[in-house]
Amino acid sequence: MKRLYVAFLLLLVTTLQGCATLDYFDMARFDNNEYLLAVQVRTQANLGARKCGTPEVNDEVSKLWGDTLNLKNYAESIPNNEETITMSSELLEIVRGLDQRYNIDKKDVSMTYCTNKFGNIEKNATIITNVVGKKPR
Amino acid sequence: MIDNAVKELEEWVSNNNTDLADWAADAKNLTEQFKSGALSEDEYKELMEDLKRSEKISQAADDLAVRSRANELLDNLIIAAGAVL
């Protein structure tokens, strides 16, 4: 029975490694720095939300922009990391709107927009943190 | 027109597909906030665009979760084969 099991495993592994599915299994592994950067974005979104409606919110938005840009740039430097690059790039675009309003256009921003925006960023950063943390070791 | 869209969103909120229901609930909340005047038009449009971006993040996250699980499974099979041999 053991021999049959070994034969089956060897057949499975060699089949998977010998065809197009090899690309599927060629993926970026868990990276401590990437995970930390994702956690920092999540934490900064949580801290920033607390400053909605106060003058300090501009600095919090700047920090969040910097943290998210760091995550995207770091993710891009890792080979075979497509999904994390997609997630961090989309998140950066969400944060861009916030930064544009507070620090570039310096528009009046409603409290509802501020809380919704930070809430959405934190929710997405949590999704990213959870999947990046479960990458194979 | 916006009322018709809200009605459609309400139907989707009660949909069994959780992802779709969550998305519809978020869109409905934002639309109600816009209608009440709590959000300006450009803020509302930006937040609705963010929902599309969030959907892309969720899809990529799902892909990554499946790929990670498949890799772990393969690693475990290889380790198990080594142990048996």
Image (cartoon, coloured by chain):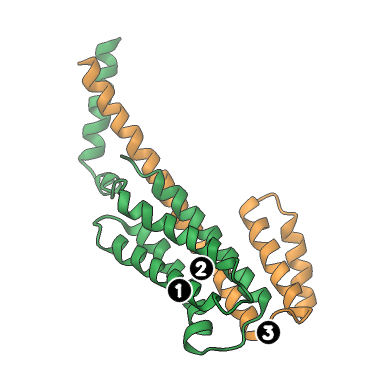
Q: Pointer 1: what residue?
A: A93
Secondary structure under tag 2 reads helix
Front residue of A20/A25: it is A25
Q: What colour do you see for chain A?
A: green
What residue sits 55% from the left and 61% below the top?
Answer: A46
Q: Which of labels 3 and 2 is toward the front?
A: 3
Under mark 3, the amino acid is: Ser
Could you tell me if the residues under marks 1 and 2 are in contact, i.e. CB atoms within 8 Å?
Answer: yes
Quarter residue A88 falls in = bottom left
Report the chain shown in orange.
B
Q: Pointer 3: what residue?
A: B40
Asked if badge 3 and badge 2 are on a common chain, one would say: yes
Residue A32 as seen in the image, left or right of residue B85: right
Residue B33 x/y as whole percent? 74, 74
- Per the rendering, the mark at residue B53 is 2
| Vertical side of A24 occupied by A93: above or below | below
